[in-house]
Image: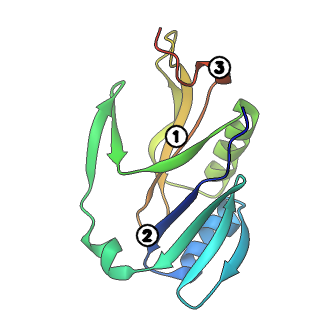
Amino acid sequence: MSLRPFHLAFPVHDLTAARAFWGGVMGCAEGRSSADWVDFDFYGHQIVAHQAPGLVADRAAASNRVDGDDVPVPHFGIVLSMADWQELADRLRQADTEFVIEPHIRFAGQAGEQATMFFHDPSGNAIEMKAFADDSRIFARD
């Protein structure tokens, strides 16, 4: 299966902080930009931080229970290889990232067993990064 890159635009309160986090901590290469937005290469996908402080300030925190954790909603992220997930978890810990949900394995022993972690960018956007030991199990039901 060959997937096409997705595009996601999201609000930030400060482009300098967004660049420091997405470019510096997350290691995403910067693409095009203007005074109001900046593109990042998010593992081959195009994400765009748009300066929109009003949208950032108006968001309310919400969550759903998933395997015993309060998962922030909305959130976005990507499914990495297990090695890339571990490398990112280590890099985030070294950067003193505050995790909403610490890196761990959820649904252990079940069809959907996965490594997951949740954290926020400087504007409060919730991010989930996950990995499966076997990518063929991403959509498995049993």
Q: Residue furthest bottom?
A: 35
Is residue 122 something one can see in this rendering? no
Number of residues whose C-alpha sits closer than 10 Å to that of mark 1, classed few (under 14), some (14–19) or many (20 or more): many
Q: Give the spatial CA distance, label 2 vs label 3.
A: 34 Å
Disc 1 is placed on an element classified as strand
* Residue sitting at x 31%, y 80%: 54
Percent x, y of residue 89: 64, 43
Q: Is 10 left or right of 131, judged from the image as shown?
A: left
Number of residues whose C-alpha sits closer than 10 Å to that of mark 3, classed few (under 14), some (14–19) or many (20 or more): few
Q: Nearer the viewer, residue 97 or 71?
A: 71
Label 3 amino acid? Ser
Which residue position is annotated with label 2? 123
Q: Give the spatial CA distance, label 3 vs label 1.
A: 20 Å
Which residue position is annotated with label 3? 136
Which residue position is annotated with label 1? 117
Tell me the colour scheme of the image.
rainbow
Mark 2 or 3, nearer chain start:
2
Disc 2 is placed on an element classified as loop
Percent x, y of residue 99: 48, 48
- Dots 1, 2 in contact, CB < 8 A: no
* Residue sitting at x 62%, y 65%: 22
Percent x, y of residue 13: 43, 79
Mark 2 vs mark 3: in front = 3
